[in-house]
Every structure is written in C-alpha cells, then in structure tokens.
Amino acid sequence: MRILIIEDNAVLSLTLEVMVKKMGFYDIEKAFSACEAIRLIDDFDPELLLVDINLDSEMTGIDVVKIAQKKRADLQVIYTTANSDIYHKELAGETDYAGYLSKPLNYDILNSTIQNLTVSKAV
C-alpha cells in the first residue's frame, strides 16, 4: 500500500513513518505542506493519506483531502490531529475518511485502523 504522510512537523512525520514501517509498509512519501501534498497525490498516487489537519499554510489538511477526493473517490484517509474538538470533526465530516485519531498517536490504534482498511479493501 502506498502511503502519503501529510504532516508539517518533521518529528511527528518521522514518527508516523517509523510506525507504518513497523507495520510492514515501506512505500511511503511525506509532504510537509499542502502544496507539496497535492503534488505528491498526483505524482505518487497514494492509496492512503495520513493527514494532519492544521498545516503550516493557508490550506488545511481537510482542504487537501477535499481536492484529492475530487480526483480520486477511492482514496483512503486517516486524520492524525491534535484537534479532537467537535468543530474540526464536523469539518472533517465534509470528507470521506476512515479514521480520526488524536495526537499523541497510539501505535496500536493506528495499526488497527490501517489493518481494518486493508481488510475491508480485500473484501
């Protein structure tokens, strides 16, 4: 599975990369901005996006997902965010997503969420 990590914090991005590699996924790219994420969605053609909501730009991770899902409706999305409030969940609800995980991330919960995606995709 090709995974694109969209996270503007380099340490958190690396942490996510280590976690998904531990799960056995090695086809990974990372984007540190919304513009870079949109470019990589086109160039890398990921199957799963791990998306931080608040990026260090004018666009949010939700904006990136909206653009991406207009191009590819089958794109899987897991939000990884410190914004667990109702406002941000409602904004995320304007997209189709498989998970909304609060930071700090828990390896077991992330692993379970990704494994559920791969199982449902195989069915």
Image (spheres, rainbow, N blue to C red):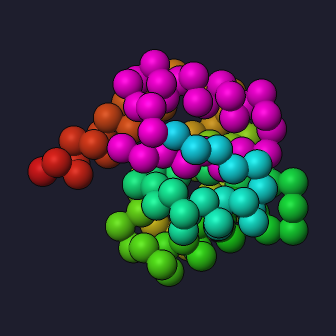
Q: Position of residue 15 (x, y in %)?
A: 65, 25
Residue at x 77% of width, y 27% of height: 11
Compared to residue 110, the image places residue 32 above or below, namely below
Q: Is residue 38 left or right of residue 96?
A: right
Left/right of residue 40 with respect to residue 116 in the rendered view: right
Q: How many marks?
A: 0
Which residue does the image show at 60% across and 30% down from the upper left? 16
Start and end of the magenta stretch?
Answer: 1-27
Viewer-nearest residue: 34 or 91: 34
Q: Of residues 60 and 38, which is closer to you in this image?
A: 38
Res 68 → quadrant: bottom right
Q: Residue at (22%, 48%) from the top-left corner?
A: 120
Q: Is residue 3 magenta?
A: yes
The percent position of residue 33, horizontal first and vertical second, equals 78, 56
Residue located 48% across and 25% down the image = 21
Position of residue 105 in the picture relative to residue 10 (left or right):
left
User: Quick check: 49 above or below 1?
Assistant: below
Residue sticking out furthest to the bottom? 70
Q: Is residue 96 magenta?
A: no
Q: Tell me the quarter of the image containing the N terminus.
A: top left
| Residue 84 in picture, x, y percent from top left | 68, 46
Is residue 75 at all visible to an observer of this figure?
yes
Residue 30 is situated, as x and y percent measured from the top left of the image, at 64, 44
Q: Residue furthest left?
A: 123
